[in-house]
Image: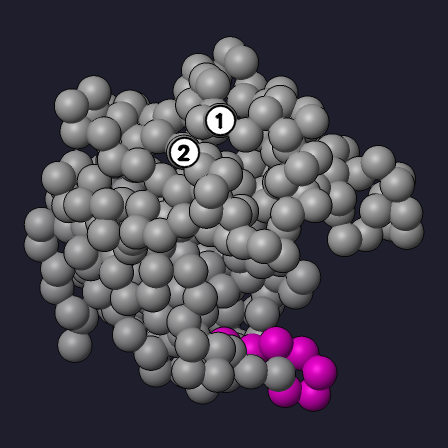
Amino acid sequence: MNTSSIFGGLPLEDNGVTPSLIAKNELIDKLKAICALEWIPNSRPGNQGGVGNTVEDLLGIKENNLPIPNAAEWEIKCQRNARGRISLTTLFHLEPSPRTMSLVTSMLLPFYGWQHDKAGSKYPETELSFRQTINAVSRTDRGFCVVVDHSYRKIVISFDSTQVDKRHLHWLESVRSRIGVSELNPQPYWGFDDLFHVAATKLLNCFHITAEAKRIDGKEHFRYYEIRMLERFSQEHFISAIQTGKVLVDFDARTGHNHGTKFRLRPGCLPDLYERVTLID
């Protein structure tokens, strides 16, 4: 993408080299300039993170390597609003503890997984899937949920076989034969402090940008239209957001590959995780 042709005289880099340090206000001006543009082609077609990568390419920076003082304290997060529905935002990846046991691939997938929908075609007949987006408000149709344990200061994954939907009774019987249908043992978990360390390192301060998406001549384009500056990520707000179902745990593993466990956020809730929110006019 040739940013110089899009921005005219705006001094943005397009040579793959991180530019010199710039002031935060200057970065805000550049983000506002992006929002003033019409439809911008996705610079990373086929990449799920293309909505954010396109902004980074326009700014001439490497992924989330913001060229401003204290760059490690800032992140750019972009959220796609397609057909009026904003997608979930991935906050960060973090495998559950005890991490040395690799519980996703050693327990959840082999004992609680189900046949992958492409088993026998794209993958072998034996390919299993454990793909669940789990929250603390209600259990999934396979009986999984998130539990916020304040007494032990940890987030726990729980399984209740009595809550499995009747559509999955055949799968439940296979779980019974593989490992039994009692509570998970051990239960995958994340300590409050471990979560906050990873989240705050990644999201201490953040520019949050919302974008619409549509296809033009067969290619995906974005129009960025709203910027919020979010400051001081809050552990208390984050744990509360998990408990109220705003933050979800997303498992995405199959026999051949674990795509990683993600903490994801419902639409419009990112500002709820911060102590200070400023809408950029």
> What is the x, y in percent for residue 103?
54, 22
Q: Nearer the viewer, residue 278 or 159?
A: 159
**Residue at screen point 23% across, 45% down:** 243
Please name whichever residue, 163 or 186, is drawn nearer the observer in this view of the structure: 163
Is 107 on the left or on the right of 84, as rendered? right
Q: Residue at x 84, y 36 (%)?
A: 126
Q: Which residue is mark 1?
A: 182
| Residue at horizontal 67 percent and vertical 78 percent from the top | 219
Taking depth in this image into account, of 271 and 264 the one nearest to the observer is: 264
Q: Position of residue 262 (x, y in %)?
A: 46, 41
Whether residue 264 is situated above or below residue 14 in the rendered picture: above
Residue flagged by tag 2: what amino acid is it? Ser
At which x and y percent is residue 273? Answer: 19, 50
Q: Which residue is mark 2?
A: 158
Q: Amino acid at mark 1?
A: Ser
Q: Which residues are magenta?
A: 216-222
User: Can you say which quadrant of the picture contains the C terminus?
Assistant: bottom left
Secondary structure category for the residue under label 1: loop
